[in-house]
Amino acid sequence: MWIILVIVIVVILMSVKQIDEYERGVKFTTGKFSKIMEPGWRLVIPIFQSFKKVDIRTKAVDVPEQEAITKDNVSVKINAVIYYKVFDASKSILAVENFRYAVSQLAQTTMRNAVGAVSLDELLGEREKISEEICRVIDQATDPWGIKVENVELKDIALPEEMKRVLAKAAEAEREKTAVITKAQGEVEASQNLAKAAEIMSSTPGALHLRTLATLNDISSDQSNTIVFAVPLEILRAFENNDITKIIKK
């Protein structure tokens, strides 16, 4: 009697299984799927029943570096990280043999296809848009497996050395173009301002003389400067007409 009781107690203790909060248990009875086991202590009868635990937390998986060819025939190497979680534990066990491996392989294939559908400029300039497209395709394919793909991030895009040199030259040419345009715009604005200043001076009596005196005052502050004084014709004409005396008296 005591032996039977001990055996029963041992069997019960062996039958108690713990499912943590971040897990779900897929229970089988005589080899057939029977139910999803929620977190807590659950009873699994040895021999007749078995179960598999499935982690339902979000997982971050590195997609190995892939070599792909863009739409404009440029060879690049690209890697990414994919974030996904299991939303149906039973499908992740029953619908696919190894969902972790399957998701990784699917991500690699989808990533190569996405790169092949765009040009190099689009790949470099629209990385976020391409990531969203890869995420959408993978999510649709993994839905029957009970897996939700939350995000895909392209981590690094490696270009061949000769392509790096070409892009560097193109960037340098673009910077030189911008510098030339900026300089030309500055010269146009400066010439316009000089034209306005000349117009104001020519229409205002004595303005040119005052500007000349101000210039002499600026350059005379340094004793090492040698000043060559050019007398404007207007001043000489003023002496001829004796108008300079009238200007001084005023």
Image (cartoon, rainbow, N blue to C red):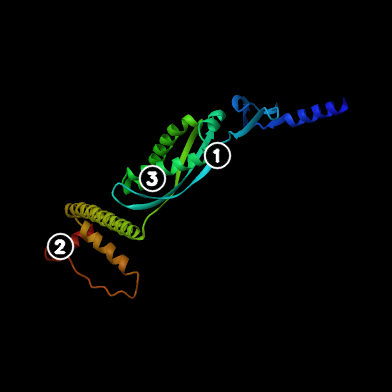
SS at mark 3 in the image: helix
N-term-proximal mark, 3 vs 1: 1
Closest to the observer, 42 or 208: 42
Give the Cα distance between marks 3 and 1: 22 Å
Q: Quadrant of the N terminus?
A: top right
In terms of depth relative to the viewer, which is nearer, 172 or 14?
14
| Left or right, 225 with reference to 21 | left
Q: Where residue 142 sits in the image (x, y, percent)?
A: 46, 33
**Which sits earlier in the primary sequence, circle 1 or circle 2?**
1
Check the image and report above or below for 59 versus 158: above
| 222 to the left or right of 41 | left
Dividing the image into 4 quarters, which one contains the C terminus?
bottom left
Residue annotated with mark 3: 112
The number of numbered discs placed on residues in the rendered structure image is 3
| Residue toward you, 215 or 117 | 117
> Mark 2 = which residue?
234
Which residue sits at x=19%, y=55%?
198
Q: Is residue 22 visible?
A: no
Q: Residues within 10 Å of mark 3 (few under 14, many from 20)?
A: many
Query: What amino acid type should be assigned to the residue bearing mark 3?
Result: Arg
Tell me the amino acid under the disc marked 1: Lys
Tell me the residue that label 1 is attached to: 59
Q: Secondary structure at mark 1?
A: strand
Answer with the quarter of the image where residue 14 lies.
top right
Number of the front mark, 3 or 1: 3
* Circle 2/circle 3 CB separation < 8 Å: no
Q: Position of residue 189 (x, y in %)?
A: 24, 52
Q: Secondary structure at mark 2?
A: helix
Q: CA distance from mark 1 to mark 2?
A: 87 Å
Residue 207: image x %, image y %?
22, 56
